[in-house]
Structure formats: structure tokens, C-alpha cells
Amino acid sequence: MLSTSVLLFSSLKGGAQAYNNWFFGDGAAVSFNPAGPLVPQAISGSAMVADEGTASISNSNGQLLFYTDGSVIYNRNHQVMLNGDNLQGNASAFQSPVIIPFPGHDSLYYVFTADAKENAFANGYRYSVINMNRDNGLGEVVSKNVLLSGSGTERITAARHANGIDIWIITNDGGSNIFRAWLLSCNGLSTVPVVSAVGEILNEFELQKIGMLKISPDGEKLCQTHFPRGSLLLNHFFQLFDFNNSTGQLSNPKKITLPEVNVYACEFSPDSKLLYLTSVSNFLEQVEAKLPTAAAIEASWVSIPSDYGFYGIQLGPDSKIYLTQSDSMLSVINRPNEKGQGCLLQLDQIDLGGKKSKLSLPFVLHDIQGGQNGFSFTIIDTCAGIVQFNGETSLQGPLQWAWDFGDGNSSTEQNPLHTYASTTQAYQVKLEIISPSLCGTIRKSSFISFTSGAANPGFDHVVRCDSAYVRFVNTTPYSNAADFIWSFGDGTFSSEPNPVHSYALPGDYEVKLTVLSAGACATNSITKTVRVEVLDIEAQPAAVTIWEGQPVQLSLSGAGNSKITWSPAAGLSARNIANPIALPNDSITYYVMAENNLGCVDYDSVRINVIPIPEIHVPTAFTPDGDGLNEIFKPFASGRFTLNRFSVFTRWGERIFTTSQK
């Protein structure tokens, strides 16, 4: 059944810019409202100090309304909202709170909260309602701390219903595998959730109640993480589920384990195909979320190098992903739809003006463009600012289309063609799809920037050292309309943004990247020398069996001028030369590593099996032919003996040689 709150039907004012202002951490805040070419920018004034989860909400013009840490609600003047204190959420909850505009209402908002481990989750999940028409437009909490569910964790999230208007709020019972999806529609909040009992039962230790729930932008996948127990690396995992955004049901659980990775938080790429995972290691983890099996997802795992680990992670309204490491800078994944290092992770990209981000970033309900109800666009001419927009919806019947191009112009066509007067700044485009038969309005938005990479192209590359295989990473900040021409310096070409190329031979190659914007009105290129140097070493003998006390000549080929290191050192005449002599006492495997000046590393090994000599063994012959084997005629004694003197006699007893050398 549905709650019986009074309904005020009118157009929703929250809309596509509702999550354009982020307030979080120790006084930190950023705005995604376009201001020239820079998005986002740090803003000041926050009165909040929050270690973990926060949320903030703005109106349809991107103007701040209020923000909260789950305990206190602050209005746009950075003062405590009327009746906005003593919420029964918790500032130590990793993901709470969540702010949702009430569909079909012009001034009402729901704030959903979760309690924290520090309070033994005593308050469970609760919600409060804010009326922004109260207190001269600064807002008032008109209903507070209504119990939603008594069993709680620090995880809570929300996702748009398949109809593009209603919203699911998803909670997770503590110490269980029970998920509850609560539907908020124009008729109010459902008091009977859709219940799914699916996946692993997280009741092994208390930290399993801390973590994150995230729904993919297309509404089809849910990620669940939990905190590890101490520094334990064994058996730590996260889960992926299928989510039906029409019914609210979860299904098809997948338990994903990344060896020696403690996952804290997760976020999907804008196209929902990739999943990013944070941990305290110096890597950002990435997997392909849409693969059919857990094994396939694990096999798709890529670790993206970083200088430090991350905690919070959040997809922004500009379709980039932002990361926090609890300091005064935010790192950014600039192209999150790209696999591997092509995602272009840039550390410390957003300066928070001395404020600290702490451990989390604000909740955002994904209403970026695309999907079943939304729009797509194609930049026809980068320099002339010509863009083709296409509205898409599953709604039937007569519809109204309301475009705001972000430059003061609008359109009521479904598929308008628009020309921007300036191409030197970013624009946030908004679309409203209005149906007379529905109480609410579908709102989508997207950022458009004409700063293709034509002016400043760039690329990096990674060479596979056991072959001539090179992966090129395009670092050019380009628009969807940009085209690329790669000349690899060996007579071959590619038009892919991030190509992989195999060279027939090692050597130095002049690689040229040319960037062509749409309309071919802005073209530029960059050329770099790429050295392809294959490092493929071979150690000899691969395996050999000798008598105790017998020396073995080791040899290494293919190392060139590389730095060489043999290990272990026991029994070796030298560790850093290509051809040391080994005189081991016992069976042993020697490993050799070669590293060239490009950082390429290769390994090989030699196995020496030593046959112990029980007493003293004297060879019947020797071969002084210069091959390094059996060159000297001498006795071999086990470790129980010490050679004092060795003599050779003729058959008639005449001594012809004597030595005391070992």
C-alpha cells in the first residue's frame, strides 16, 4: 500500500541540475554549474564537517537548496534549517544520507538516512520530509525520523524507475542477504517494499555492515561492497546483482574476488559497462560489469596505477568520476567509459581550496543523458558549434519536449539542431519530457564542451617487453566528434582512439597522432619517438645434474646492456654478470632478472640438481678442451671431508703430481 501524505501535483522543480552542487567533508564543496570551460569548481561557505556520507540538493537552475550529513540539515544560507537538527542518521555512516525530490511536487524533498556502526545501527533506516516553501523559501523539516526499516547497515542508495519518473530507494538489512526496494512515486512512499533475499549472507563480522550500494546509470546492475576485517586480504569480495528497475527485484548474484585487494567502494561508468573499485592500495581497480559470469568479470580485472589509494568514488553530472583520498584535492577519471589506462585517471585535479574531502562524496541520483528515456547528441561541427540532439522515450501518446541548451536558447522539437555562438565554454543541456497522462516529468541532462583535442593532442604508450606489442593511451581531451589518425612509423595506420599495435622488429619509430575535429576546421598533431626494445632472455643450462662439489658454468643470452641480477647468491661467483660460475652444495634453482633502461624486465631460471657424494669420488678422466666442463682433474669430496693433499701416481707407484689446493 502507499502512504497517505497529502499530494500537491505540479511540475518538479528539482530536475536535471538537482545534484550540481556537492557539499562534503570538512567544509569542502564544488559546483558543476558551467562557468566557462572549467567544470567543476571549488566553492566556499559550507558549515558542515562530515567524515563520511553526505548529500546536497539544488533546484532546476543549479542553485543550492540544502545539504546534510544525516544528522543536521543546512539551508542555502549555511544555517541549520528550521527543525533540521537531531536527525537520526549518523555522520559516521559511510553512504547515508540520500536526498530525493518528491516526484510531481514543486517543493517537497525526502531525506533518507542510515545509522552507523558507532551507534550499533540502533536507528535503522529512517526518512524525513522537507517543504521548501516554508521559512521564506529556506525550507523546514515538516516530518522527521519516520522509521522505514529497523534492521540497517551503512549502505543505502536510490535509482530511477524504468518509467523515468518514480524512484527506488534500496536498503540492505544488517547481517543478512536481504535487500528492500521502496518505491517513491507521485502518490507517495510505498510502505511495503519489494524484498529480495539473494547473494552472500554478510554476518561473519561487524564491518560487513559498512560499505556501499550503487546502481548503474542504466538501472540494470547493483554493486555491493563491505569493509574488510582489519588488514585481512584473504576471501575479501564484493557482489554484483541484476536489478530490475521496473519491479525493484534483485537477482543473479555474482561474488567477485580480486586477489590481495580490499575493496571499499564502487562506481559504474556512464555507459554502465565498467565498474571502478577503490581500496587503500596504490591502484584503482576496474572490471567489466556486464560479463555473464563471476569468472569472466574477474578475468577482465585491470589495475590502474596511482600514487595512493582512494576511499569515496562518485559519478558526477558531467559524466566523469571523482575520487577522494581524504585530503584537499579530488582526483578524476576523465574518460570512464574507456578500458584500462585509457580511462585517463588524473590525480589531484580539483583543488578544494584548502578544505578536506574526508572519506566520502555526496549521493547523486543518476539522470545523465541516454537510456530508455533521455537524449543523445552528435557534434556536427566543433568550430561552428553545431549540435544535433535526439530525444528518446518509451512513453506513449502525445508528448511535450522542452529543451534548454544551456546558452539561453530552447526548443520544443523532439530532435532539434542547435548552433552555439561560442565554443570556448561548457554548457549543461537539459531536456524535459512531459506527458499529460503522467503526474511527473522526465528530466535528463548532459554537459557539452567543444574543446576537442585539436589544439593540444597528446599520448602515452606502454611497451610489452616480451614482444613488440605497444598499447597507446590517448591523453587528448577530445569531444565525441573528434577523429584520430595514428601513423605508427612503420607504414601502418589506425583511427581508433586508443589503439594497440604490434611492430615486426625492435627499433625507434616516429609515431604521429593527428586529431581532426568535426568539420575538419581544427586539426593538430603530435609526434613522439617510440622505442620498441624487446627483452627476451634465456639462461643456460635450463636444467643440469651434477655431483656434489662440481662447478657449473651459467650463461645468459638476450640481455644486451641490461642490468642483470642472479639470486640467490649462495654458491655463485658473482650475481651481476651474464656468465657466473655456480658451485652449489645442494640442489637449487637460480633465478635471473634482466632490466633494461626502458624499464622492461624479463626473468628466467636454471635448475641444478646436486647428487651428494657419500665418500670421495675421483673421475676416471677429464676433458681440458675449453668448454668449461671437467677441465680440471681433481677429486670430489662430500661435505664431511676436507682435502689436505692430492697426489697422482703411475701404475708403478711413482708420484708424478701433488697439490694441497682444493
Image (spheres, rainbow, N blue to C red):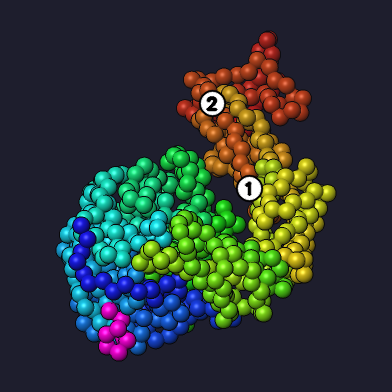
Pointer 2 local density, CA inside 10 Å: few below 14, some 14–19, many at least 20 = some
Per the image, the residue denoted by label 2 is 610
Q: Residue at x 67, y 46 (%)?
A: 465
Report how many numbered discs are placed on residues in the image: 2
Asked whether residue 314 appears in the rendered view, the answer is no
Q: Quadrant of the C terminus?
A: top right
Q: Residue at x 32, y 83 (%)?
A: 75
Q: Could you tell me if the residues under marks 1 and 2 are in contact, i.e. CB atoms within 8 Å? A: no
Q: Residue at x 60, y 26 (%)?
A: 544
Left-right relation of 301 to 564: left
Nearer to us in this view, 306 or 98: 98
Label 1 residue SS: strand
**In the image, residue 269 above or below residue 412:** above
Query: Furthest-bottom residue in view?
Result: 136
In the image, residue 141 lies at what x, y percent? 23, 79
In the image, residue 450 lies at what x, y percent? 65, 71
Mark nearer the N terminus (1 vs 2): 1
Nearer to us in this view, 164 or 324: 164
Asked whether residue 543 appears in the rendered view, the answer is yes
Label 2 residue SS: strand
Residue 135 is covered by the magenta coloring: yes
Pointer 1 local density, CA inside 10 Å: few below 14, some 14–19, many at least 20 = many
* Distance from the alpha carbon under mark 1 to that under mark 2: 29 Å
Nearer to us in this view, 634 or 520: 520
Per the image, the residue denoted by label 1 is 601
Q: Amino acid at mark 2?
A: Val
Residue 302 is covered by the magenta coloring: no
Q: Amino acid at mark 1?
A: Val
Q: Which residues are magenta?
A: 131-138
Number of the label disc, if any, that sits on residue 260:
none
Q: Residue at x 48, y 71 (%)?
A: 330
